[in-house]
Amino acid sequence: MFESLSSKLQNITAKMRGKARVTDADIKEMMREIRMALLEADVNYGVVKEFVADMSEKCKGADVTQSLTPGQEIVKIVRESLTELLGGEAGSDKLLSSSTGFNTIILYGLQGAGKTTTAVKLAKLLKTAGKKPMVVSVDVHRPAAAGQLKVLADAVGVDCYIDPEEKDAIKIARDGEGKARYLLCNYLIIDTAGRTVVDDELMTELKDISNTVNPTEKLLVVDAMIGQEAVNVAQTFEEAIGMDGFIMTKLDGDARGGSALSIRKLTGKPIKYICTGEKVDAIEQFHAQRMADRILGMGDVISLIEKAQTTIDEEEAIKSMERMMSSGYNLDDLYSQFQQMKKMGSLKDLVGMLPGAAGKVNDEDLDDKIIDRQMAIISSMTKKERRVPSILNASRRKRIAAGAGVEVSDVNKLMTQYEQTAKMMKQFSNGKGGFKMPKGFAKQAAKMGMGGMKGLPSDMQLPEGMEMPSSGGFGGLFGRKNTDSDEGTYTPTGRRDRKKKRKGRR
């Protein structure tokens, strides 16, 4: 996603970040490089021209020239300008909602943009958020459209209404709305017909459907692969029907991302969601600032946490952590962790959300097939071998390698990874399922300004539902409360408080 543009902008900002003095020549050269990077990413020429001119003016302002760290100020200006280009104002990326509690979303778009799969992806996302959605297909021109929607909806457990025998799209829309209200659904998502090109017949049909169901939200599904043509399509739909926003699809492919950077500026309509893969959970709400941070290699920790909260089985994760803390960690737990990682998406996307990680890890090391290979190795073991890894001698490893279709060296690498993890967790375990500080850890933490968590910024905000662990220990994170009787209470200077013990002896 924005891979080429991202790497170029990261290189440009890296050059500026460390500069103690910035000249007009430096700014001019940076603007030239940014202009070329945006044009190569297929961003509209008019958008690029206005963007660069505005940013150049800001970089020559007093905030930069009088700053003690002008390089950092310029990076800040690039970030803010890119955020503004992508949408800027917070809240515009949220779905509109009806005061009645019943919301209708119509998805428009050309044939092949991915409307049908996007309808189910959006429905699944709403269902995960505690809503009750229903999808309906009013595509009477493509015979397989309704059947495809039904299969996908059934796979994710979402209500679906289709009528393959009916040839009147308006009647199907009306009947679908009635069925959704009868089932007490609060979201109705309508998958409309598409064409390879925009024509009057299609627009008339879409207008009639819109007038029939009175939608809360009209979203255009745009294929990021078609580049600048996406902007032309968006402007045509906006003039003919009127749009409330966009859903960008196929951002995981070879798309250069220019359409996403152009479409908001040229139409004035926000991007609501982006689809980054073919799986039904490969959709996420679009946030302009988070996306700008990702493009500039600054990470997106909030989105990473949100993805973890929606995909990871919290109960299973707690059980696994408790086993790790009680020295009962085995290869079944490692296999479970690999499964949880796969649910969160590709390794490349996950690393891209970590601040400062973009560009620091080779793409070869982020191959998702590596996890599949590790899981295959564990699957080739017997139950006893997974639960008691210490019995894995040379002959057993040779048999496991043959069963998984890998080399013995691959099995050895996996076992080294497991042993290192188990050893690390043993150092932090008190043997009772709780957490203990390794010797000298608290003292070192105090030197770094971490004692009692005092080194953290006072304005740091954690996502809703998360709490900062107390300075007394991290046991509460792992399903049990840490007590003084386990390992004693540590002061910010790293010394154990032994006053209670001394009193007891007296």
Image (cartoon, rainbow, N blue to C red):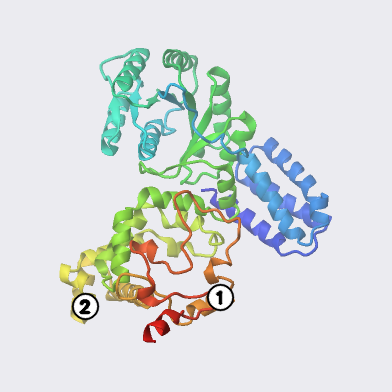
Q: Which residue is mark 1?
A: 446
Relative height, residue 438 to residue 150 (above, below): below
In this rendering, would 265 be left or right of 480?
right
In this rendering, would 11 be left or right of 337?
right
Instruction: Kindly indicate the quadrant of the structure image that contains residue 107.
Output: top left
**Residue 360 placement (x, y as % from top left):** 54, 65
In this rendering, would 460 be left or right of 121?
right
Residue in the image at 26% along x and 63% along y: 376
Q: Callout 2: helix, strand or loop?
A: loop
Relative height, residue 8 to residue 404 (above, below): above
Residue in the image at 53% along x and 30% along y: 245
Q: Callout 1: helix, strand or loop?
A: helix
Instruction: Kindly indicate the quadrant of the structure image that contains residue 431.
Output: bottom left
**Residue 331 placement (x, y as % from top left):** 26, 68
Q: Quadrant of the C terminus?
A: bottom left
Q: Which residue is mark 2?
A: 392
Instruction: Kindly indicate the quadrant of the structure image that contains residue 325.
Output: bottom left
Looking at the image, tell me whether mark 1 or mark 2 is earlier in sequence order: 2
Q: CA distance from mark 1 to mark 2?
A: 42 Å
Disc 1 to disc 2: CB gap under 8 Å: no
Residue in the image at 42% along x and 57% along y: 347
Q: Which amino acid, by three-letter code, is at mark 1?
A: Ala
**Residue 174 placement (x, y as % from top left):** 35, 14
**Residue 78 placement (x, y as % from top left):** 69, 50
What is the residue that sits farthest to the bottom in this orientation? 506
- Residue 412 visible from this viewpoint: yes
Closest to the observer, 100 or 192: 100
Mark 1, residues whose alpha carbon is within 10 Å: few (<14), some, or many (≥20)?
A: some
Numbered mark located on residue 42 in the image: none
- Residue 374 visible from this viewpoint: no
Mark 2, residues whose alpha carbon is within 10 Å: few (<14), some, or many (≥20)?
A: some
